[in-house]
Image: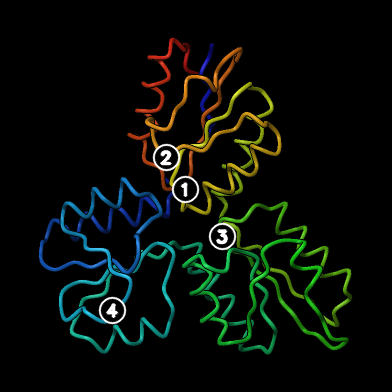
Amino acid sequence: MRIRIARRIGFCFGVKRAIDLAESILKKGGKIYSLGSIIHNREVVEKLSRRGLKVVNGIGRIRSGTVVISSHGLSPRTVARLKKMPVRIVDTTCPFVLNAQRIAKHLSAEGYGVIIVGDVKHPEVTALLDFAQGTAIVIKDSRSARMFRLSENSRISVISQTTQSMDNFIGVINTLLAKRPKEMRVFNTICGDAEYRQDAARRLAKKVDVMLVVGGRHSANTRRLYEVCSKILARTHLIENERGIRPEWFRNAGDVGITSGASTPDWIIKKVVDKMRKLKLHKVT
């Protein structure tokens, strides 16, 4: 058998930036808090926690020290509260997420109803809702869009969670257009890395017998990669690390493909490849 690795794996720019910022702060010591997981990878977060980064779900018990805003962004109302506290704020929000936040705020100020294509419970989306100042709703997919009602004079705008698939985004747009709103503005806020990574995984899934998607189960971009690959190849498996590999997946398999979410570090991918080698798979490409 042959192991084939997708062209884009490992940390994306935004995640690497967030981790680098967190590590530089940890070197200085002191009380350091992360509002939610800085990225959606359990092993990386645990590694940072052992070095002193305490993950908290709210600011209620923080009295001093440094507060890290995760790569997914934070509600402007919470940021305003933090600025009134005796803490240092370190913002690791991904630049692509910052761009989506600026667009949501601008569209709301212009009087548009803002539609966010994404997962309503994801921290990036909950922050975007606040940036839209109460004028936004979240639509998951085309099916949800079909149930959404528009008036004849609707002035709407559509943006996306940065880790969405382009197929899903376009599907929602087309469904909304069919409802004939008076005006509809569309902004593609999908991260360029997410698009490239999905496309590379899609191409690889067409060439292999089994596909492994490596990443955190709570990672939106990892789940999106799994969805993209599993539509092409039924023998697609999502694993967080090498311990999730099952030898029976590879019976009668020729080539095995590996891709990873944007918050999966290279060292986890290496462990996956090493485990595959122990299963008598060889020739990594």
- What residue sits right under mark 4 in the picture? 59
180 shown above or below 196: below
Along the viewing direction, whichever of 230 and 178 lies nearer the viewer: 230
Query: How many numbered dots are placed on residues in this image?
Result: 4
26 shown above or below 144: above
- What residue sits right under mark 1 in the picture? 217
Q: Considering only order in the chain, which callout, 1 or 2, is on the residue closer to the N terminus?
A: 1
Mark 3 Cα-neighbour bin, 10 Å: few <14, some 14–19, many ≥20: many
Q: Give how far apart the Cα atoms at labels 3 and 2 are.
A: 21 Å
Mark 1 Cα-neighbour bin, 10 Å: few <14, some 14–19, many ≥20: some
Question: Which amino acid, mark 1?
Answer: Arg
Q: Give how far apart the Cα atoms at labels 4 and 3 are.
A: 26 Å
Mark 3 residue element: loop
- What residue sits right under mark 3 in the picture? 162
Q: Considering only order in the chain, which callout, 2 or 3, is on the residue closer to the N terminus?
A: 3
| Location of residue 198 in the rendering, given as x and y in whole percent from the top left corner | 61, 43
Q: Considering only order in the chain, which callout, 4 or 2, is on the residue closer to the N terminus?
A: 4
Q: Which residue is pictured at 71% across the width and 55% down the height?
A: 168
Question: Which amino acid, mark 2?
Answer: Glu
